[in-house]
Amino acid sequence: MFESLIKKFVKFIDRKLEKYRTKESPAPKYTPKTLEEFIDVLRRTPKDILSSQDRKRIAAIMSFDERKVRDIMIPKNNLVFVNSKEILGPLILDKLYKSGFTNFPVVDNHDKVVGIIHTEALNALEIKKTDRAEKYMNKSVHYLHDTDSLKYAIEEIERKQSYYFLVKNQKETTVGCFTIQTLLDYLLN
């Protein structure tokens, strides 16, 4: 997996260098053979060719195998939870929409997660003033552990066909969430 990422980044750098080439100077045929050679090429690439943002992206990819879910997850204190018995009135709906999230963990009276509400469920239905959150939640909840690798997280995204996971710690306490968007933000920003 890592070797294919290196090859993709070599192509990426090669495209970046394209605008600096003249017809007399064809693209170099050199391809790094080791990680050390690849890092050396990166270090020697001028900053006007490879921006600091590009360098950050490359560093993110290169450290991918070492990163854990906890490194890029959204912490629990940033999430918006909904009680299963909560009436989805205008104030609650406004709070959910203003949060910017599309998924909301639903908890029971003991703060145990019992489902997830996606904004599509709220948009697609006519919510009555007496409807409770539990009516619109999906009971299927997927979990990752904060110590899981990002590679494992990607495998779980594929296996579960889900892009939203709650994250638990060793004590099985929810400590955050992991989404495909957090992964893309890590890799591309």
Image (tube, helix red, strand yellow):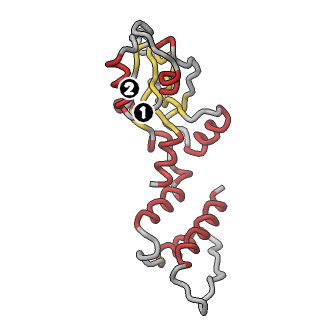
Q: State the SS at label 1.
A: loop
State yes or no: discs 2 and 1 in contact (Cβ < 8 Å).
yes
Q: Quadrant of residue 48?
A: bottom left
Residue 55 is situated, as x and y percent measured from the top left of the image, at 45, 65
The mark that comes first in sequence, 2 or 1, is: 2
Left or right, 148 with reference to 174: right
Q: Is residue 137 above or below residue 187?
A: above
Given residues 28 and 110, the one toward you in this image is 28
Residue 145 is situated, as x and y percent measured from the top left of the image, at 52, 32
Q: Which residue is mark 1?
A: 101
Q: State the residue at coordinates (65%, 73%).
A: 33
Q: Quadrant of residue 9?
A: bottom right
Disc assigned to residue 96: 2
Given residues 57 and 94, the one toward you in this image is 94
Residue 103 is situated, as x and y percent measured from the top left of the image, at 47, 28
Q: State the residue at coordinates (43%, 31%).
A: 176
Amino acid type of the residue tagged 1 in the rendering = Phe
Disc assigned to residue 24: none
Q: Is residue 56 visible?
A: yes
Amino acid type of the residue tagged 2 in the rendering = Leu
